[in-house]
Amino acid sequence: NSGKSSLFNLLLRQERAIVSEIHGTTRDYLEGQVSVEGIPVRLVDTAGMRASDDPLEQEGMRRAREVIQAADIIVALVDSQAGPARAEEELPGGLTQPVIRVWTKADLPGPAAPAGHIAASVITGAGIDALERAIADAALAGTSGGPGEPLIDSARQRDLIDRALAALARFRREQAEGLPADILAVDLAESL
């Protein structure tokens, strides 16, 4: 759907997806990295879900379901011209991830965005800030930090921080025991 592909391009701030009004033209998925309020985010633009007899389109939808199941956050795009009922039918069942619903093409005449939807327009840019804020909030849900605070995003980073904290704890303990500075320097160097 052109709203989806254009929204992907707008969030990435570059033209990556080819935009078309013809349904079923997206058969593969595109990925891109972006920083949303300082949080590294990998965006994946997938094929939309709908009934189709086209084997290529069916394969695109199968792959899209795999991507959706593996996602941490789902941004479900609802075409304001089609309505929310159709969009709900397109989402696979049993999702446990947060779902952010975006009411696309909000610049066109039609019904207002339903409750719980972010009204957005790729033409005017309306709603993009709210969408980025919702993505950041969902990404930080369950963490103790807020936007702009450091975020540990890998096991390697967590291990390095744990090792640095252990070295600093040894430094404090050995300093309290009165060990010489050259021995204390080893713990400080390790913490660095």
Image (spheres, rainbow, N blue to C red):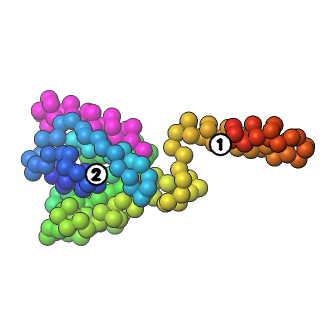
Q: Vertically, is 46 above or below 38?
A: above
Q: Is residue 145 magenta?
A: no
Q: Is residue 58 magenta?
A: yes
Q: Quadrant of residue 102?
A: bottom left
Is residue 63 shown left or right of residue 141? left
Is residue 162 shown left or right of residue 180? left
Rounded to the nearest angstrom, the CA distance separating label 2 from label 1 is 35 Å
Q: Which residues are magenta?
A: 51-73
Residue 6 at x, y percent in the picture: 19, 53
What is the three-letter code of the residue carrying label 2?
Leu
Q: Residue at x 14, y 29 (%)?
A: 55
What is the three-letter code of the residue carrying label 1?
Leu
Q: Residue at x 15, y 52 (%)?
A: 2
Residue 47 at x, y percent in the picture: 22, 41
Residue 38 at x, y percent in the picture: 44, 56
Label 1: which residue? 192
Indicate the secondary structure of the residue bearing disc 2: helix
Q: Residue at x 85, y 45 (%)?
A: 175
- In the image shown, does 125 or 115 lie closer to the viewer? 125
- Regarding residue 119, the answer to whether it shows in the image is no
Q: Quadrant of residue 49?
A: top left
Is residue 155 shown left or right of residue 168? left
- Regarding residue 133, the answer to whether it shows in the image is yes
Few, some or many C-alpha atoms within 10 Å of disc 2 (few <14, some 14-19, many ≥20)? some
